[in-house]
Image (tube, coloured by chain):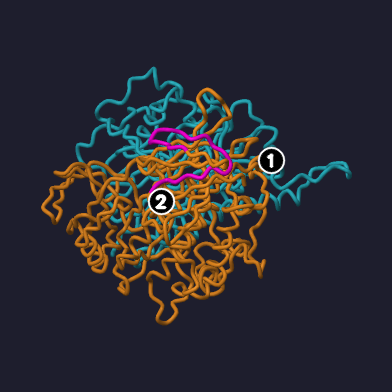
Amino acid sequence: MSGMLDDGTRLAAENGDDVEILGFLGAGGQGEVYRVRTPDGERALKWYYPTCATADQEAIVRELVTRDFADDRFLWPEAFVPEHRGSFGYLMGLRPDRYKGLPALFRRQLRTSPRALLTACLYTVEAYQALHSRGIAYRDISWGNIFFDPDTGDVLVCDNDNAVVEGDASGISGTMEFMAPELVRADPGARPGTQSDLHSLAVLLFMLLMNHHPLKGRRELGIHCLDEAAERKLYGRSPLFVFDPADDANRPDPLEHATVLATWDAAAERLRELFRRSFTTGLRDPAARVRESEWRDALRAVLDAVVECAACGRQNMTEPGENPPPRDCWGCGARLVLPPRLTVTTPPPRTEHHIRLRRAARVQAHHLLPEPARHDCSDAALVAELVEHPRKPGRFGLANRSRETWTGTRSDGTVQKIEPGQTVPLRSGLDLDLGGGVRAVVRAR
Amino acid sequence: MTLGVRRWETLADSVQGVGKRRNQDWYACQGTGSGPDPLVLAVADGHGSAVHARSALGARFAVDRFVVLAGAFGRAAHDCHEPGRLARLMTYARDDFPRALVHEWRQEALGHWDRNRPVVEEASREPGTEEKLVLYGTTLIGAVLTPWLFVAWQIGDGDLAVVEHDGTLVRPLAPAEEDLGDETESLCGREAWRAMRMHWAPLFEEARSPRLVVLSTDGLSKSFASADGYREFVSGLAGRLAQEGGAGVREALPDWLAQASRYSGDDTTLAAAVRPAPVPAGTPAAPGGPEGPVEPGAAEARTPPGPDGGEVDTERTTET
């Protein structure tokens, strides 16, 4: 549709920028987004529907613009664009093409991988954690706000115009599917905030990894068009996890919900346990919800334990740590053969990271820290990677991609220095001093 | 907010493909486009081959279920100016409506199968649910128009064309890449709701609502040598409707569809809604000329519409 603003329309942002509409990008639940030209280059303009252009919304946007939240994981409101023909909007950065929305993921229109999805989950958790640590409640976590790069898992949180300072009671616009049950029920005293965001975050993570809503089992099949009372029951009054261990009344339907049955089976138990807690006790007791730090640690651990199936090459989650239970490939059913494990021990407070040494396995800078503030799985933070010997196929080594010289001690006691760029042959028992008090040991299992 | 009540004029027809035993398309136009009586348009194209032996029924079930669900959705949207309501409606339209539609279509198809089991030997194996559904395989394009909303959904091939208030022609549900060959997504597919595309367009000013909405099965667009031919057909249709109103076009429509069907060899169905608008003085002649839309199969051979009809060709897809 042509939207509310014609191409060529000129508006004035409150920061003094001249804004010219170049084209319509899309329509959402609160407004439309346009590509615009400004003196600083092309930007995106969110323009509210007249029914959503309320005084409350204007106050929130103005507050967010004032906050000037500089974080590359967010497209943040940068400048308020005042009223024109009954509405207003704000300028933000344009979303680069590599970021894709979750509807495309759910429609199988994206090529991605378990590793990229786990990375996207990890980054999503950290992004919301960054907001909460600044005292901002997001309030509107949903699958319409998160965009991710299907190759790398990088995330971009968009539509940040419902984030408010913690405790602010201005009107909620959260989607019921993502709202904490106490908000759906409108319990006395219940307010959107960090605790309710934790529920929304768990739903979002479940949807990213399982491609399905955690409360939509057999019970949803009887709900008719926009039956609000039935939805309030599903999400608020008597929510029931589709994999609740104590009550199977809302189990997935084998025909209608085949995907979640498959994705749940393919998930690591470490994550399933957190989801069970989120959607059983966490539904009833906000204080029992899985905290961001718990999600972060579990997601990193499972990410480090992803291996390729030797038979078909598909990526599979396995249990982190030593001696995980045997597991079959979700794709071809072959028994997974686990590669050796690298245990990285950080300086105090000592933390162990267990990295399965699959083909092209990587040690990142965050593995060297006991409590990393932010994970970075890109080449920029690469410390070591598993490489195949160029002339001896099947022989692998750990290449030093850091700036530190490592000291390696073999199980027979021989010691060698591994300079940046050099590779040390992979052997069980190899003990590496990575510098800065970080130790890494290669173990067969 | 006060919004005018738009009245739409509709036209629709379907012709059987040459050499086909029966027409496996189905369509419906229902309602006026007012708040209590939303306008619902739908066309469906049963897949037709032997493995989809009951696809004519599948197409009919799809259209019937869509009309009921979309009508209910349109009526539920009467309060869309309430705070937060549009976001809620969009979420429903994007996430829940496709699931509800696929669920209901499956129930209807499986119910029909149960009541009309093929005569087989007693010892033969009961087909699985998916096998039964394949018999009824069909595409679907549907739209609902209220004074405040225009929402459309599509699964599989076929076309939704919209002539905007300013004459721009868009195909908001056109896939980024055309399907290759004759394989198409289908309501009988596994978790078919995932394949459904959605177009969402709230309306706030009557003057900016679309002039014409056209839904057609792929028998129409396949009859043209190129996508340009199809666009010229639609813009020609818009022009002729603007000039002559619906009556003359309605009379000519079966011939146009029959001609398209001769070129495509397929059943051909069109359902359209036009918003009557006063024609300002000095309005140029309708694109496509006085004879009507560009003839199917002849797009390359004819002179393209001149500047007077040159409001077309802006392709844009909406996020789905």
Q: Which residue, given by chain and number where applicable, does mark 1 sit on?
A: A334
Q: Position of residue A361 (x, y in %)?
A: 50, 40
Q: Position of residue A215 (x, y in %)?
A: 56, 63
Q: Is residue B119 left or right of residue A413?
A: right
Q: Residue at x 28, y 34 (%)?
A: B311
Check disc 2 and give the amino acid type.
His
Figure label count = 2
Identify the hue of chain B.
cyan
Q: Is residue B282 left or right of residue B312?
A: left
Quarter of the picture containing the N terminus of chain A is top left
Q: Residue furthest bottom?
A: A188
Q: Which residue, given by chain and number where applicable, does mark 2 sit on?
A: A366
Identify the hue of chain A.
orange
Q: Residue furthest front?
A: A413
Q: Chain of mark 1?
A: A
Q: Residue at x 45, y 47 (%)?
A: B198
Which contiguous range is marked in magenta?
Answer: A416-435
Q: Residue at x 59, y 68 (%)?
A: A240
